[in-house]
Amino acid sequence: MNSSLENLFSLPGTWYDTVGVAYSYVAHAIQSNSDGYHLFVLCTYSDSLGNPTTYLRDYYLSTPWDTTTAALSSEKSISSLVSGTGWRGMYIRPDGSHLYLLLDGYWTGRYLYDFSFGTAWNVQTLSLSDTGTIADYFFTLNTSKPGLGGLLFSSDGSSFITSWYDDTYVIQEVSLSSSWDVSSSWTLSDVYRDWE
């Protein structure tokens, strides 16, 4: 197994540099592009002092869908764009133009951030969407629900599904008044609740 795959598939875990200093990596979400040549991993790296930095990593697969051909192509620090810990979900639009990240800060709030790619699928060109004030970049989800996780949009961007755990497993749907616009008005409804 090559070193890129070791980094990809050994997450979460502890890594050591050449002098034996421990570093920790945790993977939060993974998604591929439609042709299978790129695999995107949202992960957080903590240094030996426990300082976290979250990255979006792009692995190039020289043979589509074959992870044995994966090599790290590029990465972008999400922490350089927005602060926060507790990343729980990721979704990249099918055209590679936008990245949506779900943050579950638990005590500090839950947010859905919209980032844009300057060039489709190129993580180096990632930036917060320039739609205006900070309120336009996210909306707060129901803060009474702990354990938020997962993110999947409908094909037309009119709604998305996420889940949480609050003594039962819940899958919820959020409908957006304007497709793909997370700052637009929205309607929240439970889709499924596992009472067992």
Image: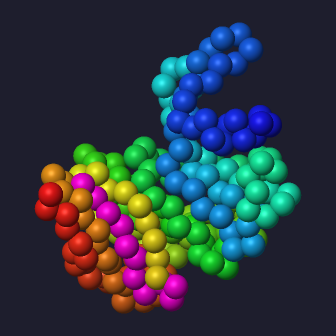
Q: Dividing the picture into quarters, in which one does residue 61 lie?
A: bottom right
**Left or right: where does residue 10 sit relative to residue 4?**
left
At x 73% / y 52%, what residue is drawn? Answer: 67
Asked if residue 192 lies in the magenta stretch, the reply is no
**Residue placed most toward the observer, 133 or 112:** 112
Question: What is the total number of numbered labels drawn onto the structure image?
Answer: 0
* Magenta part of the chain: 155-165
Q: Position of residue 183 (x, y in %)?
A: 40, 77
Is 92 placed above or below 9 here?
Answer: below
In the displayed image of the protein, which residue is found farthest to the top? 19
Main SS of the magenta segment?
strand
At x 24% / y 59%, what residue is drawn? Answer: 169
**Residue placed most toward the observer, 79 or 24:** 24
**Residue placed most toward the observer, 80 or 157:** 157
**Left or right: where does residue 84 sit relative to residue 68?**
left
At x 75% / y 72%, what residue is drawn? Answer: 35
At x 14% / y 62%, what residue is drawn? Answer: 195
Q: Position of residue 97 (x, y in %)?
A: 65, 75
**Left or right: where does residue 132 sit relative to residue 167?**
right
Confirm whether residue 129 shows in the render.
yes
Is 25 placed above or below 55 here?
Answer: above
Query: Which image quarter is the N terminus in?
Result: top right
Asked if residue 157 lies in the magenta stretch, the reply is yes
Q: Position of residue 196 (x, y in %)?
A: 15, 57
In the displayed image of the protein, which residue is found farthest to the right? 62
Report the colour scheme. rainbow
Q: Position of residue 122 (x, y in %)?
A: 74, 63
Confirm whether residue 143 shows in the render.
no
Is 178 placed above or below 24 here?
Answer: below
